[in-house]
Image (tube, helix red, strand yellow):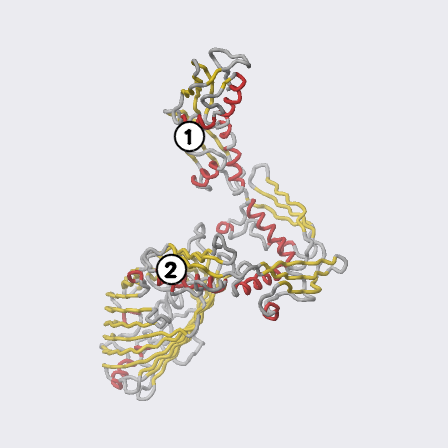
Amino acid sequence: MLAAMAVPALKAADGFVVEDIQVRGLQRISAGTVFNYLPVNIGENFTSDKAGPSIRALFQTGFFKDISLEREGNTLVVNVVERPSIAKIIFEGNKDLSTEDLKKALDSIGLSEGKVFNRLVLEKVEQELRRQYFSHGKYGLKIETSVTNLTRNRVGIHIKISEGRVAKIKQINIVGNKVFDKQDLIDEFELSTTNWLSFYTKDDQYSKQKLSADLERLRSYYLDRGYINFAIESTQVAITPDKKEIYITINVKEGDLYTLEKVKVTGNLIVPPEELISLVQVGPGEIFSRKNATQTSKAISDRLGDEGYVFANVNMVPEIDEEQKTVDMTFFVDPGKRVYVRRINMRGNTKTRDEVLRREMRQMESSWASTAKIERSKTRLERLGYFEEVNVETPPVVGTADQIDVNYSVVEKSSGNLSAGVGFSQTQGIVFNANVSQDNVFGSGKRVNLAFNNSSIITQYSFGYFDPYFTLDGVSMGYDIGYSARDANQANISNYSTDVINTGFNFGIPLNEYDRLRFNIDLKHTKLNTSSYSSNEIVDFVQNEGEKFLTLATSVGWTHDTLNRAIFPSEGGQQRLSALATIPGSDLEYYKIAYKHQQYFPLSKDFTFRLLGELAYGDGYGKTGSLPFFEHYYAGGVQSVRGYNQNTLGPRDSNNRPFGGSSKIVGKAELFFPVPFMEESKSIRLGSFFDAGTVSDSFKIDNMRYSVGLSGEWLSPFGALAVSFAVPLNSDSQDDTQAFQFSFGSGF
């Protein structure tokens, strides 16, 4: 309310010189705040016609619900009654939207804890909450709001919400389409009518944001197929009276089909024209495609970025001939200024040394900026495996037009790893093994591994060390030493055991950005132990070769790696080719060759498809007639062909126990997708797979085994956990199947 001056009354022409100003009634608001907004100062002549503007100025602050002015002598007295403050806001009944999200929404309209309470703002609460829930398809929303007065001029706001059921999409109809079938167009949408997967995908739940995205997909579908003048004329969304079903109608105008007449690249090209022409993905006579034109612009821009023109603009300028239904497309290149990098900054690496990150840099300071090198440096940081997240920014240097800084920010994760393998079988019960490793010792990037395994299968003690940058050029060096006693019978294979003492040395040489050679030298002493239950094959081997063997083996391996991440990659591939042979004169002379290739294909932001193939073969030479049986290959298990018990595929010995073979074939096809409601997590994923594999003595595929199923992988704080549920497709009575399998501490 507005109040005039109280005592004494003043005529418009009367007034007094303000010698002092007093504010009465303040509780939380400071007197300085009032003085700041009051348009009257000490020493001014105050008249009654200034009262109204003064009161209005204070009301506009929103802090007060009542204001009056009085005169006491030559002192101006400002009497105020403060509005109450909001002590707390309590939500009840909200499930679909979190309390935090709802509080953020109300804060955007000026209602939040600690602020001054204004009933006029409270009236907007229901409108804002309805807007939030309507965007999630909940139209049966009911809201009750109550305000409770608290002590010290405070209030509490209680908002009771009955969310109701999500309105389901009953029908999506497209009107006006003639060229493309309606169902083909609707299949491009994220929204859909209810189907058997809707409980998981939620695609039948209406959302205004999702509909907007689907309309853009529809527009892109036509523009990528030559219909330049395509337009969405109107969209109607109707809801049934019970607010449970939604009908969507989209009216479109397709227009005519346009083809490309001419394609030109002009402007300041910087690089030889033939290099840019090879990047053009559109050509004369082709149907116009906005997607291909956009990809061409990006490809040219990226190419200029490699030359230091990171702010280059490549504009598409179409000239449309409405009569001939053709388009002349010109790509105008404006490279801007060439830019170089002033500084490369690392942030977030509290444990990892700065030099460990900087040695992965392919972009150098004080050199021309390269988009490809900046991104490749980011990828190399992600591939280290030390960080949960890696981000890069390239802000321009203030005051310059040709400099940028490159800022890499990382979120570190635990580089120590406690891993274990756990399994179940009818014969051995629970199997446990443990391994402690530190991939980033003292932040140096060096790896130390200490294994101490003790289970019914193996007793093992080993120590390993690996330095990925033994030299500044990236030559790696490592060594290991260990002892193991292995009972093969407990691992689902033949009845024998081995005691092995080994030591080895390895080093790697980078050939280029993606290829690497690795060399190993391993000295191994093996003692073979048999029993009265050992098979005829094992007994014959011992009679021919003995039971103690000293071997010196050399091996060479080649790796071609373009994966974008070390853990849970989503694109790129990896090839590994290795060959091992014991040197002539060793107690056993044999060789082994293996090749493994896996490729990841990103299908969308959340879905990744992987293909994997693995081949391996070994044999004896010289005085050793065949590959020693304890060097055989095996298949089956959670890291091989799922659905079959570990190591059980392939040939069997005279006791009908798995005996392995000298060759192995394994293939996998797997679709990875995020866990529902955890789409942003980078440490857990699900998958559906098809596995195939066999073990034999001569690459026979007639005994190939197949399985399908679901998988789950979680990079937990204690190690990697892999889980699978598989159904064998062609098992026979001899196969040892196992539907549920999991491994703790296995690599992916």
The foreground one among 417 and 365 is 365
Callout 2: helix, strand or loop? strand
Residue 487, located in which quarter of the rendered image?
A: bottom left
**What residue is rendered at 40% in x and 68% in y?**
641
Residue 168 screen position, x and y as percent: 55, 44
Residue 290 screen position, x and y as percent: 63, 59
Q: Residues within 10 Å of mark 2 (few under 14, many from 20)?
A: some
The residue beneath circle 1 is 86
The residue beneath circle 2 is 723
Q: Residue furthest bottom?
A: 622
**What residue is rendered at 43% in x and 64% in y?**
364
Give amino acid for label 1: Ile
Residue 7 screen position, x and y as percent: 46, 11
The quarter of the picture where the C terminus appears is bottom left
Q: CA distance from mark 2 to mark 1?
A: 49 Å
In the depicted structure, whether residue 482 falls above or below residue 236: below
Give amino acid for label 2: Val
Mark 2 in CB contact with mark 1 (< 8 angstroms): no
